[in-house]
């Protein structure tokens, strides 16, 4: 189940962990355009985000076993339409385009792990779109 304001990449990572799969194996469900944002020294940044076309959103809904409307309410990136992947000859294929969270729906930060575990039943990392003044969990001070 997605968290309110969660990054699409975060939800995909949590779904992969639930199935015991590597994230790279689950990302193969989409034809990806571009490359994820990288940290200095290597590794993918925590605010790397995927914008999906309509077919890609359907694949994500099937992977998470929730209605597309539920995902649309929870994931801000699903409201973003990228003409490069949503039109043309291959628009019927599940496609995704790498972006940074700041260019999609605003600043992102890691969610509080205890709150994420309480809401999802999994003790894994999640990343959410959060304004700077809401980045400290009032319950846990993290």
Image: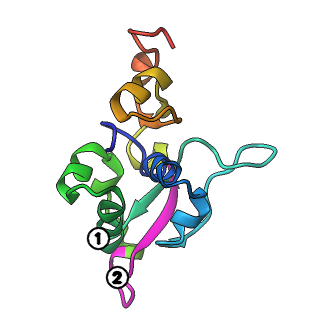
- As drawn, which residue projects farthest toward the right? 41
Q: Which numbered marker is on residue 29? A: none
Q: Position of residue 8 (x, y in %)?
A: 42, 51
Which is nearer the N-term, disc 2 or disc 1?
1
Badge 2 is on which residue?
A: 91
Query: Residue sitting at 41 percent across and 60 percent down?
Result: 51
Name the secondary structure under disc 1. Answer: helix
Q: Residues within 10 Å of mark 1 (few under 14, many from 20)?
A: many
C-alpha distance separating marks 2 and 1: 8 Å
Judging depth in this view, the residue of 14 and 93 nearest the camera is 14
Q: Position of residue 141 (x, y in %)?
A: 48, 8
Is residue 88 magenta-colored? yes
Q: Nearer the viewer, residue 105 or 119?
A: 119
**Figure quadrant of the N terminus:** top left
Residue located at (36% from left, 72% from top): 83
- Asked whether the beta carbons under mark 2 and mark 1 sit within 8 Å of each other, the answer is yes
- Asked where in the image residue 78 lies, by quadrant, the reply is bottom left
Q: Circle 1 sits on which residue? A: 54
- Residue 90 sits inside the magenta stretch: yes
| 4 with respect to 122 (left or right) | left
Region of the chain picked out in magenta, as a range: 86-100
Q: In front here: 82 or 130? A: 130
């Amino acid at each position: 189940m997605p968290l309110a304001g969660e990054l699409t990449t975060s939800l995909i990572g949590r779904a992969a962990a639930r199935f015991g799969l590597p994230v790279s194996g689950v990302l193969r469900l989409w034809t990806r355009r571009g490359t994820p944002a990288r940290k200095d020294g290597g590794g993918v940044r925590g605010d790397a985000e995927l914008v999906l076309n309509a077919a890609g959103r359907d694949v994500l809904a099937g992977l998470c076993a929730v209605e597309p409307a539920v995902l649309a309410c929870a994931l801000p990136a699903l409201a973003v339409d990228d003409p490069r992947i949503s039109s043309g000859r291959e628009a019927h294929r599940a496609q995704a385009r790498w972006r940074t969270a700041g260019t999609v729906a605003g600043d992102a930060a890691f969610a509080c792990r205890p709150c994420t575990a309480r809401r999802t039943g999994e003790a894994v990392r999640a990343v959410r779109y959060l304004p700077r003044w809401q980045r400290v969990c009032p319950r846990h001070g993290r």
